[in-house]
Image: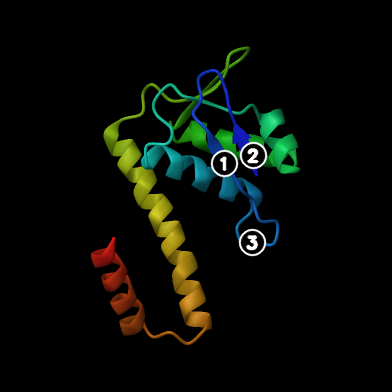
């Protein structure tokens, strides 16, 4: 886990599970998108450097670099040599919504997988989601 207190960055916590079905870089991508989508990270906020994040999580710099490269391709973050990594200033509301929908979709896939593996029927899962939605 890493709590990053950067000059331009709000507190972020990254947690990776090396035993997860998702790769380390996919877990990092998901967490950054989720932090942006739920407002923990805003346009212009800094994110940790590749090296510092890799060191703090005890993972390969290649995993973090791949995550950042994917996020750059999607226009979610920008990297400026010598200045660091930031949530893209060009990030539109529709991009944010797309990032949130993708993050929720990925989480839903995990939930569905767990439900199927444990014999939970679709109607039971729908009912549970409905109850939780209404209680939220």
Residue matched to label 3: 20
User: Viewer-nearest of labels 3 and 2?
Assistant: 2
Rendered location of residue 106, percent (x, y):
45, 58
For this view, does 107 lie left or right of residue 83? left
Rendered location of residue 38, percent (x, y):
37, 42
Q: Nearer the viewer, residue 14 or 72?
A: 14
Position of the C terminus, as image quadrant, is bottom left
Question: Residue 92: which quarter of the image?
Answer: top left
Rendered location of residue 127, percent (x, y):
29, 78
Mark number, residue 103: none
Residue matched to label 2: 2
Contact? badges 1 and 3 (CB < 8 Å): no
Instruction: Tell me the crowding category of disc 1: few under 14, some 14 to 19, or many 20 or more residues within 10 angstroms, Cα based.
Output: few
Q: Nearer the viewer, residue 48 or 78?
A: 48
Contact? badges 1 and 2 (CB < 8 Å): yes
**Mark-to-mark CA distance, 3 and 2:** 18 Å
**Mark-to-mark CA distance, 1 and 3:** 18 Å
Q: Residue furthest left?
A: 134
For this view, does 121 lie left or right of residue 47? left
**Mark-to-mark CA distance, 1 and 2:** 5 Å
Residue matched to label 1: 13
Instruction: Tell me the crowding category of disc 3: few under 14, some 14 to 19, or many 20 or more residues within 10 angstroms, Cα based.
Output: few
Return the disc, 1 or 3, that comes first in the chain's sequence.
1
């Amino acid at each position: 886990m890493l709590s990053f207190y950067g000059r331009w960055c709000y507190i972020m916590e990254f947690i990776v599970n090396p035993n997860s079905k998702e790769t380390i870089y996919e877990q990092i991508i998901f967490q950054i998108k989720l932090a942006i989508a739920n407002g923990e990270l805003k346009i212009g906020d800094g994110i940790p450097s590749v090296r510092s994040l890799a060191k703090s999580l005890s993972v390969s710099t290649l995993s973090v670099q791949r995550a950042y490269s994917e996020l750059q391709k999607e226009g979610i973050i920008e990297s400026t040599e010598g200045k660091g990594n930031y949530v893209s200033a060009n990030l539109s509301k529709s991009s944010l919504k797309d990032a949130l929908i993708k993050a929720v979709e990925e989480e839903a896939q995990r939930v569905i997988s767990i439900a199927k593996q444990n014999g939970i029927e679709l109607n039971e899962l729908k009912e549970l989601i409905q109850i939780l939605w209404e209680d939220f």
